[in-house]
Image (cartoon, rainbow, N blue to C red):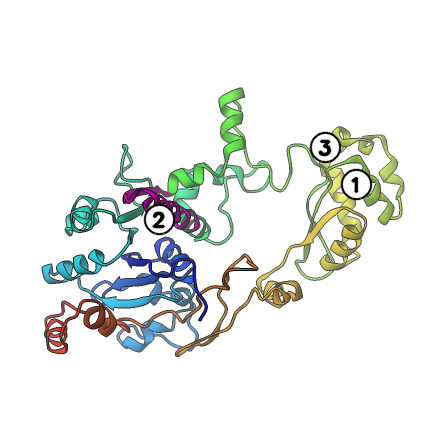
Amino acid sequence: MQGFPLDGIRVADFTQIVLGPHMCEWLAVMGADVIKIESRARIDNVRLANPYVSGKFDPKRVENLNIGTGFTALNLSKKSCTLNLKQPKAVELAKKIISISDVVVDNYSPGVMDRIGLGYSVLKEIKPDIIMLSASAAGSKGPLGDLLGFAPIMDAWGGLDSLTGYLGGSPDAIGHGAWTDLVVAQHGAFAILVALHHRSRTGEGQFIDLSMMDDVACRIPEAIMDYIMNRRVRKNVGNRDDIMAPHNCYPCRGEDKWVAIAVSTQEEWLALCQVMGNPEWCREERFADELSRWNNQDELDRLLGEWTRNYSHYEVMEILQRAGVAAGPSYDVDELVRDPHLRERDFFIEIDQPEMGKTWPILPWKQTATFKGNYQPSPQLGQHNDYVFGELLSMSQDEIARLVDEKVIY
């Protein structure tokens, strides 16, 4: 049987929405036994979110809580148990789960875990070597320690939006609203792996305070250094680069089709001119060297776009890549899913998801001597109550049934 890097590691997952679930999903794919602790009393919003696989959605029907594609994509390979943490008995059961776990993860607002009796000071008394990660908008310390916020807000507050958008325009968000959630989730998984490595060497657990705002700011180091060194506040410049020109997305044949082109050297520029047939404008003084081209980007982009319009975005990529010039098509989702390169790399792996058919999870690396990933369907709500309470906690069926009636297990 295939082994996984995190075999034998158990994670108590108190997370919801995007950031926390995706973080714990990474751990589950690497083999950890991730127990998602959720409740009908407070449904994870992503269970209720579009898109759905089939037709109309009725949240009053329990089975419909398992058909949201967003939840499925963020919770692969986990187990689900239901605990109504508003009830003291449920909190005590949560402590028992934590006592046999290695890692606890939450992305509630700062202070929530403390208020329900599951803060780090309590957990390390239950299990001294426990690793706890709390993810929040701005961390648990500092004047913004109680800040609430979702990814688009933190992109703005962390300075990222001020650098994106059209040249001379207003700040703009990056693509999908949850993009930062997904990136921070990966960084959080990395921090947990570091903590597990540290514990294996020292026996020490620890608390990890993960701030989305800090994480976003870490992604704009050049702008921060520019300000520290030169007191220069960078603004959005569209697709342009500080040095390279041409450097942009250019229109191609077809409806709303584009190709990205980046020329970094004089040799690449001459190669680009050659594949275009060395038009007369390429020999003009205003495009003679790197600095001249950079200073005349508006006209350079217009003229280059007149050439790219004659080809599909994929044809431009093939022509320029053969000439040694960096270029790539700007894919939409349909083109991405159909891309033969990704399919040959087994980027899409089919999982038979109950009530939903086939889904395609993603592990974006290949390793020759280790593993291919632990890919299992995402859990139905409360699907593993018997496993968690009966098998792991050794509770009798009568006791479990009584707590179900009391809406403790709910």
* Label disc, if present, on residue 196 of the rendered structure: 2
Q: Nearer the viewer, residue 298 or 125?
A: 125
Q: Earlier in the sequence, mark 1 or mark 2?
A: 2
In percent of width and height, residue 358 lies at 48, 75
Looking at the image, which residue is at 42% across and 47% down?
A: 187
* Label disc, if present, on residue 109 of the rendered structure: none
Q: Secondary structure at mark 3?
A: helix
Q: Residue 296: which quarter of the image?
A: top right
Crowding near pointer 3: few (<14 within 10 Å), some, many (20+)?
A: many
Residue 98 counted in the magenta span: no
Q: Nearer the viewer, residue 262 or 358?
A: 358
Q: Quadrant of the N terminus?
A: bottom left
In the visual, does 362 lie left or right of 62? right
* Label disc, if present, on residue 294 of the rendered structure: 3
| Residue 192 visible here | yes
| Residue 86 visible here | no
In the visual, does 192 lie left or right of 60? right
Amino acid carrying mark 1 in the image: Glu
Amino acid carrying mark 3 in the image: Trp
Q: Earlier in the sequence, mark 3 or mark 1?
A: 1
Q: Are marks 2 and 3 in contact (CB under 8 Å)?
A: no
In the visual, does 222 lie left or right of 151? right
| Disc 3 from disc 1: Cα separation | 15 Å
Looking at the image, which residue is at 53% across and 57% down?
A: 364
Q: Secondary structure at mark 2?
A: helix
Reading the image, the residue beneath label 1 is: 268
Specify the segment rendered in magenta.
Answer: 186-211
